[in-house]
Image (cartoon, rainbow, N blue to C red):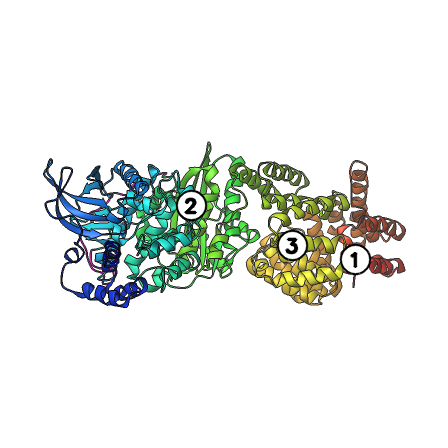
């Protein structure tokens, strides 16, 4: 065997020796093709002789001198270097001396990189990082003198099985703290693995090989883009012995050859923590290529399903570190350090049978950004280790409106916006039912969030507070199990407002992890996906969306301006495009803009959305509604709506069922419409619009008792809402119950501000009195609209409806013709809108229904 072959054999031996015993033979079999050499290597691994004695040939000998360092013993050989125990003859202390492997000694570029990265690592000074004392060259041998650590590698410790939770917490926290210090200086380890972590006898953790690891992968942070390499090159290097044994600890971006930054180290730390808890690797395959593929594509088995005593807080942090997308990990490694739980309150050795490695001394936990509310104070005191653990699967959740703690109402949009964004993000998880905005905002300001959760029938609730000061945002949020009142998760954030989306990412990811949702990689990406990276554009969007909730023309127009300003900053911001489209579509529905002009703007926005996000479900619903309500393309609309009603993405967006249900109602198919609104009400049970629509569909289906019960339920919930009383008046009139009909219509007029009609009905007794009151109110409304039409646009359909109620047929049909020519939105409802009942027997009406194409 020549020198090169022996060097490769030594490398295989060293790497195999660091693996668990069961993995050694498969490793050698995979990487050694020569059957004779394979048998010899396996025999050497199983021999009682020390490994250093076996691989010591051609190595430095005891007594050899490199600079001031006298060699005492060979400790090990890695892919790029050999490590010796040496004595500093000047300072009289032991050191670990790493030298560049002989087979690379003649490669100047590698020697230069070895020295350059070693000097970079020597700039680090942290208790969790092995200190680099000196760098030099003796007789063409490059070397690094490092702190001598008396202990065992994490790989050696893991050979005996999983570690106690307390020790996992301590080791993970110390490693994270060391990494954070390195990341603060722009240095990324890139080769974090059990072989590069030392555990000392006094409870300290030390990270090894900063400089060398950087060299092994992609150089310094500055040139990582240039020489990062490809996955194929990485695999090839592995097969040459350069990074053998490391593949299972790479981040997805490393494994696929992409640029890797500090978040890559977070992923590797997550892999280490997983292995310490589970006693097995998070990602493994029969070959290096299969392992890399698993890292890129597969989700690991949740660690809590392997190690049931794992604290949920720790499991959530591990899962977040193992996120495929770097953006879904921690925004900084300092954030990771702050999130890690301590093990102070857990007695040593009482964590499910794990092995106590060493005493873990109490570590004082510093919490930055404490906010002056009781919930946040409790969070800061209790820490992660006291969070509850749900014993039952939680499949439904309500994000209650976050409380605005500032006295400035101008910041109300932040609390509303954060609430709505969390609802939107969590609604992207197919396995989770999330109560929609229309429902949860009924509980705004509730003093009993648990009762709200019980009323909604959900498994868990999210509550919290939002406060803003200058350009800073302070958010506190917690997840509570409704059945037990247990606090499953909680966190506080003190960040610049520009970081709002990252805060939302963190909260949504933590909640998903805490609920133990088994998400695919795609689902995790969707959970934290957002439409813009421009924080100012997002702030403008939140302000606009907040205004849309008021449903007034003035606020709609102001919201449109804000959405357009957001698009000036980021033309690819899909949600802002949809916001602009929503204001124009609503202007048609409310009758304060000509349909053709408004729909043209809607079309423009939807085309832009389609170019950016062709699969956007909201845009598809809006486009189908346009074909139904303006083009009157009934066949296309039915085909499209049937497909959309089966789309699981629509199921999480309750209001998106409303235009679909309205289509079937307009066709005279109320049972189909009822089924769709029932689905909308599953996620938005308190949405008044959906509930009133449901009652109307029930009336059309002849299910009057159910409709009446629905109206009464709405009235009990919102006693000042005129809508349910109009509906009850119609039902009582159909049944011939004149007294109750008059009473219901009088209340409807009172709540809608029709004082004239309310006064007339106060003394009404007969059906004629009822009719006279309706006619009087119709005349008042007509007069008001005619006056308004002299100043601005008024939909001719509104005027036609009032003339129809007055049984003024000629004027009614005159304005209906104008509405037809404009393609007013309400024309599709001619068959079912009760406003036309007085003229429905006119032949002109039937002809108009045919011209609109209503089936």
Q: Quadrant of the C terminus?
A: bottom right
Q: Secondary structure at mark 3?
A: helix
Disc sitting over residue 830 in the figure? 1
Q: Residue at x 73, y 51 (%)?
A: 762
Q: CA distance from mark 1 to mark 2?
A: 60 Å
Q: Quadrant of residue 286?
A: bottom left
Instruction: Inspect the magenta stretch and tell me whether residue 540 lies in it.
Output: no
Predominant secondary structure, magenta span: loop
Q: Which residue is mark 3?
A: 620
Residue sitting nearer the eye, 839 or 233:
233
Residue sitting nearer the eye, 746 or 787:
787
Q: CA distance from mark 1 to mark 3?
A: 25 Å
Residue sitting nearer the eye, 257 or 494:
257
Verify CB contact (< 8 Å) between mark 3 and mark 2: no
Q: Can residue 672 be seen from the camera position used here? A: yes
- Please rate how many residues cluster around mark 1, counting C-alpha atoms within 10 Å: few if below 14, some from 14 to 19, many from 20: many
Disc sitting over residue 259 in the figure? 2
Give the image location of residue 154, x and y in percent.
Answer: 23, 54
Give the image location of residue 410, x and y in percent.
Answer: 54, 35
Instruction: Inspect the magenta stretch and tell me whether residue 357 lies in it.
Output: yes
Q: Which residues are magenta?
A: 348-369
Q: Number of callouts in the render?
A: 3
Q: Secondary structure at mark 1?
A: loop
Disc with the residue nearer the chain's start (1 vs 3):
3
């Amino acid at each position: 065997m020549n020198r090169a072959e022996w060097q490769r054999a030594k490398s295989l031996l060293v790497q195999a020796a660091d693996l668990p015993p069961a993995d050694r033979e498969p490793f050698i079999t995979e990487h050694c093709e020569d059957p004779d050499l394979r048998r010899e290597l396996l025999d050497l691994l199983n021999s009682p002789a020390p490994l250093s004695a076996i691989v010591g040939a051609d190595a430095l000998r005891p007594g050899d001198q490199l600079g001031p360092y006298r060699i005492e013993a060979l400790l090990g050989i890695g892919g790029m270097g050999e490590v010796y125990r040496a004595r500093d003859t000047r300072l009289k202390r032991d050191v670990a001396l790493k030298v560049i492997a002989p087979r690379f000694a003649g490669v100047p570029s590698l020697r230069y990189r070895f020295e350059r990265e070693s000097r970079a690592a020597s700039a680090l000074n942290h208790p969790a990082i092995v200190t680099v004392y000196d760098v030099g060259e003796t007789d063409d041998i490059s070397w690094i003198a490092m702190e001598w650590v008396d202990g065992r590698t994490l790989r050696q410790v893991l050979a005996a099985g999983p570690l106690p939770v307390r020790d996992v917490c301590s080791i993970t926290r110390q490693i994270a703290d060391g990494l954070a210090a390195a990341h603060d200086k722009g240095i990324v380890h890139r080769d974090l693995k059990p072989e590069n972590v030392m555990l000392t006898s006094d409870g300290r953790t030390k990270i090894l090989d900063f400089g060398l690891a950087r060299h092994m992968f992609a150089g310094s942070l500055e040139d990582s883009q240039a020489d990062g390499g490809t996955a194929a090159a990485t695999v090839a290097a592995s097969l040459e012995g350069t990074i053998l044994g490391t593949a299972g600890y790479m981040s997805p971006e490393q494994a696929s050859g992409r640029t890797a930054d500090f978040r890559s180290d977070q992923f590797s730390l997550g892999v280490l923590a997983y292995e310490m808890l589970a006693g097995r690797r998070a990602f493994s395959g029969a070959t290096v290529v299969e392992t890399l593929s698993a890292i890129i594509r597969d989700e690991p088995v949740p660690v809590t399903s392997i190690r049931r005593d794992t604290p949920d807080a720790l499991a959530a942090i591990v899962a977040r570190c193992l996120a495929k997308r770097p953006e879904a990990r921690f925004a900084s490694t300092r954030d990771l350090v702050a999130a890690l739980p301590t093990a102070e309150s857990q007695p040593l050795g009482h964590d499910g049978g794990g092995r106590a490695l060493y005493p873990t001394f109490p570590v004082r936990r510093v919490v930055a950004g404490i906010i002056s509310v009781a919930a946040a104070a409790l969070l800061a005191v209790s820490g992660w280790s006291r969070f509850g653990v749900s014993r039952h699967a939680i499949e439904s959740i309500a994000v209650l409106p976050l409380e605005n703690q500032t006295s400035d109402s101008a910041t109300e949009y932040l609390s509303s916006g954060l609430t709505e964004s969390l609802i939107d993000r969590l609604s992207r998880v197919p396995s989770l039912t999330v109560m929609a905005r229309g429902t949860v905002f009924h509980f705004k300001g509730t003093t009993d969030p648990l009762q709200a959760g019980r009323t909604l029938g959900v498994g868990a609730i999210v509550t919290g507070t939002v406060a803003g000061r200058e350009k800073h945002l302070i958010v506190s949020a917690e997840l509570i199990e409704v059945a037990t009142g247990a606090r499953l998760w909680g966190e506080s954030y003190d960040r610049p407002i520009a970081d709002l989306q990252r805060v939302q990412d963190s909260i949504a990811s933590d909640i998903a992890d805490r609920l133990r949702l088994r998400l695919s990689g795609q689902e995790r990406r969707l959970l934290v996906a957002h439409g813009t990276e421009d924080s100012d554009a997002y702030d403008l969007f939140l302000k606009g969306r907040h205004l849309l909730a008021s449903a007034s023309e003035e606020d709609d127009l102001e919201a449109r301006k804000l959405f357009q300003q957001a698009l000036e900053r980021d033309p690819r911001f899909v949600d802002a495009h949809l916001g602009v489209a929503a204001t124009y579509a609503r202007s048609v529905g409310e009758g304060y803009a000509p349909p053709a002009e408004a729909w043209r703007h809607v079309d423009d926005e939807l085309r832009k959305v389609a170019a950016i996000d062709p699969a956007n479900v909201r845009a598809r619903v809006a486009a189908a509604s346009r074909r139904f309500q303006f083009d009157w393309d009934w066949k296309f609309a039915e085909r499209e709506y049937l497909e959309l009603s089966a789309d699981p993405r629509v199921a999480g967006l309750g209001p998106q069922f409303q235009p679909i249900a309205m289509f079937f109602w307009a066709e005279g198919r109320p049972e189909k419409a009822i089924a769709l609104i029932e689905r909308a009400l599953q996620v938005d049970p308190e949405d008044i619009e959906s509930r009133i629509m449901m009652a109307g569909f029930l009336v059309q289906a002849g299910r009057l008792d159910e409709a009446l019960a629905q109206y009464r339920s709405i009235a009990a919930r919102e006693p000042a809402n005129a809508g349910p009383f109009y509906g009850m008046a119609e039902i009582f009139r159909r049944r011939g119950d004149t007294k109750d009909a008059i009473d219901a219509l009088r209340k409807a007029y009172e709540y809608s501000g029709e004082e004239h009609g309310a006064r007339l009905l106060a003394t009404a007794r007969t059906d004629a009195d009822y009719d006279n009151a309706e006619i009087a109110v119709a005349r008042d409304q007509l007069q008001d609209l005619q006056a308004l039409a002299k100043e601005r646009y008024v939909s001719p359909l509104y005027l036609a409806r009032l003339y129809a109620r007055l049984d003024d047929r000629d004027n009614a049909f005159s304005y209906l013709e104008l509405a037809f020519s404009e393609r007013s939105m309400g024309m599709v409802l001619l068959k079912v809108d009760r406003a036309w009942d007085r003229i429905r027997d006119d032949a002109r009406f039937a002809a108009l229904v045919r011209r609109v194409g209503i089936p």
